[in-house]
Image (cartoon, rainbow, N blue to C red):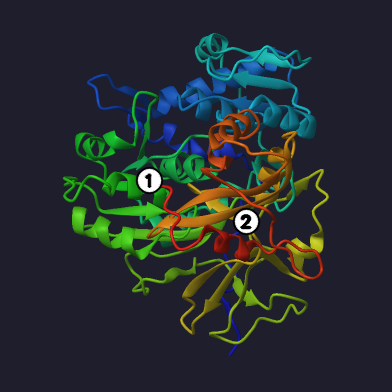
């Protein structure tokens, strides 16, 4: 039998359609119910009802239009973890503007590269991300955004569900991130996650520990709870990972979502976590180590259910309470998806069950991206006949469960973010004394990995100086945590860098924790 599962029969997205209107539909059903709580460990709580949230979104949308922005214009979001982020994001989509969420950690160099790529008509900044750079785009300050939330209301713009809704950047296999274009229908596909991953209902309270710019947070943490009438909770700027155990109890959280690294940090100093309302945890962004999952269950009495996906399609393979997957399985394709395991090269015919190959998604999936903006990425690396290639390896069993076997390329998972080693290498090579550099992921303790840079140089370079240099050119999550100066780097007979051989240069002990 071949490694293909599902029939891709999820109901078609209705038309006309608007992503923001769908996400906020419960403003008509339960207007006074809390839609969003900005959680903190203090006694001050910021709560937004469904009615207030929708009104703020439509008022902000009106403000965008009043400033002269027109349908299709792109808005760069450089906001921190405040409620302004999702309000501005949905406001743009509500009136057919195109938001581009980005991390507040990005450096000026990275931001300028994004500006050149997307040509935004407006930029929204927080106090932390404001810069002195001159630009011809419309600038919105934090004060202006707050004032716009209380003005006249715009109306949702409905249209073809296949039209562009938002753009999000993901690191590719080149030195430059790729801009992924998603349609309004993307949120319609997320119903499959609600059913076969979250098992969420309108009575749930879901706390997500990620930053708003991450699609995992925007989708799982905000849009999906709102689309089903639940209450979403997010960490405000005064909270950190150490406060999460107290927040789970204080806010009666029933579902908790985070990347594996966050679970690991929570468990570092806790063996017993009091979360009486917690039903289970959700995890995505990178492979969940079995040891972390086991420790979480011991500490809370609940399980973590994992999902697999990517920026181009969010999650489409997942585990849930109704499945009995082995500890090495990432779950099975969600009902309504069609997934296959294809040979690494050439053929579009799925491999036999139990044989390793590339995890692929049917191109008709309504959650799949529209494509890459202005990309030079080869379609041969992305598509094969009617399949989208994820670049991740796996093998499928007869019941559809899939075991994850790692990347087929050299991409690195850093705290849930995919980082291209080539992008990091390009930034470090701009250092005047570095001759060659190679970046790889190394394990420093059991189930804990970091980004490391191996380099040759004209003279001796200190790790502190290199870390300072990297901080001006790379977001924090992309920066190497360790640097190793070498006499030479390992290359094969054809001149290709041998990344697996880099770790051999570290010797028997390389604990950098």
Q: Is residue 460 left or right of residue 269?
A: right
Q: Is residue 151 left or right of residue 509?
A: right
Residue farthest toward the bottom in the current orientation of the protein: 1
Regarding residue 16, the answer to whether it shows in the image is no
Q: Position of residue 409 (x, y in %)?
A: 66, 63
The one nearer the camera, 38 or 267, is 267
Q: For label 2, count other residues whose C-alpha is less than 10 Å away and answer few (under 14), some (14-19) or many (20+).
A: many
Number of marks: 2
Q: Secondary structure at mark 2?
A: loop
Q: Position of residue 446 (x, y in %)?
A: 37, 60
The one nearer the camera, 241 or 333, is 241
Regarding residue 243, the answer to whether it shows in the image is yes
Q: For label 1, count other residues whose C-alpha is less than 10 Å away and answer few (under 14), some (14-19) or many (20+).
A: some
Q: Position of residue 246 (x, y in %)?
A: 22, 36
CA distance separating discs 2 and 1:
20 Å
Q: Which residue corresponds to mark 2?
A: 411
Q: Which mark is residue 262?
A: 1
The one nearer the camera, 298 or 255, is 298
Q: Which mark is residue 46?
A: none
Residue 41: quarter of image: top left
Quadrant where the image shows the N terminus? bottom right
Residue 510: quarter of image: bottom left
Relative to 31, residue 458 above or below = below
Q: Secondary structure at mark 1?
A: helix
What residue lies at 79% left-to-right and 71% top-to-bottom? Answer: 493
Q: Is residue 155 left or right of residue 137?
A: left
Relative to 231, residue 486 above or below = below
Q: Position of residue 454 (x, y in %)?
A: 62, 50
What residue lies at 59% left-to-right and 34% top-to-bottom? Answer: 475
The one nearer the camera, 319 or 336, is 319
Relative to 269, residue 189 above or below = below
């Amino acid at each position: 039998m071949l490694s293909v599962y599902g029939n891709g029969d999820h109901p078609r997205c209705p038309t006309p359609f608007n992503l923001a209107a769908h996400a906020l539909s419960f403003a008509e059903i339960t207007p006074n119910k809390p839609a969003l709580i900005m959680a903190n460990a203090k006694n001050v709580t910021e709560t937004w009802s469904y009615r207030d949230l929708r009104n703020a979104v439509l008022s902000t949308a009106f403000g965008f239009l009043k400033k002269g922005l027109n349908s299709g214009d792109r808005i760069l979001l450089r906001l921190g973890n405040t409620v302004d982020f999702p309000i501005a994001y949905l406001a743009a989509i509500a009136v057919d503007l195109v938001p581009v969420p980005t991390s507040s950690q990005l450096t000026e160099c990275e931001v300028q590269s994004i500006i050149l790529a997307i040509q935004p008509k407006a930029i929204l900044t927080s106090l932390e991300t404001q810069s002195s750079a001159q630009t011809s785009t419309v600038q919105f300050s934090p004060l202006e955004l707050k004032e716009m939330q209380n003005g006249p209301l715009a109306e949702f713009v409905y249209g073809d569900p296949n039209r562009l809704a938002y753009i999000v950047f993901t690191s590719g296999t080149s030195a430059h991130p790729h801009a992924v274009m998603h349609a309004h229908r993307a949120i319609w596909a997320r119903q499959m996650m609600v059913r076969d991953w979250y098992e969420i209902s309108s009575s749930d309270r879901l706390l997500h520990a990620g930053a708003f710019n991450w699609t995992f947070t925007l989708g799982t943490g905000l849009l999906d709870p709102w689309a089903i009438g639940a209450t979403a909770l997010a960490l405000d700027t005064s909270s950190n990972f150490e406060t999460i155990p107290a927040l789970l109890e204080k806010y009666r959280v029933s579902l908790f979502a985070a990347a594996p690294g966050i679970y690991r940090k929570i468990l570092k100093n806790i063996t017993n976590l009091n979360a009486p309302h917690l039903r289970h945890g959700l995890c995505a962004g990178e492979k969940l180590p079995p040891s972390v999952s086991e420790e979480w269950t011991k500490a809370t009495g609940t399980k973590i259910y994992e999902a697999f996906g990517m920026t181009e399609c969010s999650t489409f393979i997942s585990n849930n309470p109704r499945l009995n997957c082995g500890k090495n399985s990432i779950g099975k394709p969600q009902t309504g998806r069609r997934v296959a395991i294809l040979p690494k090269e050439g053929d579009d015919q799925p491999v036999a069950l139990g044989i390793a190959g590339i995890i692929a998604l049917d191109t008709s999936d309504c959650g799949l991206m529209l494509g890459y903006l202005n990309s030079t990425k080869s379609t041969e690396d992305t598509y094969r006949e009617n399949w989208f290639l994820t670049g991740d390896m796996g093998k499928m069993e007869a019941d559809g469960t899939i075991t994850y076997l790692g990347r087929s390329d050299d991409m690195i998972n850093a705290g849930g973010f995919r980082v291209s080693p080539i992008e990091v290498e390009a930034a470090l090579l701009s250092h005047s004394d570095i001759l060659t550099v190679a970046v790889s992921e190394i394990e420093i303790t059991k189930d804990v990995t970091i980004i490391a840079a191996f380099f040759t140089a004209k003279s001796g370079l200190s790790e502190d100086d290199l870390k300072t240099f990297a901080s001006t050119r790379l977001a924090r999550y992309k920066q190497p945590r360790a640097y190793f100066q070498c006499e030479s780097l390992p290359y094969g007979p054809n001149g290709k860098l041998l990344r697996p051989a880099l770790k051999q240069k570290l010797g028997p002990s390389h604990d950098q924790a």
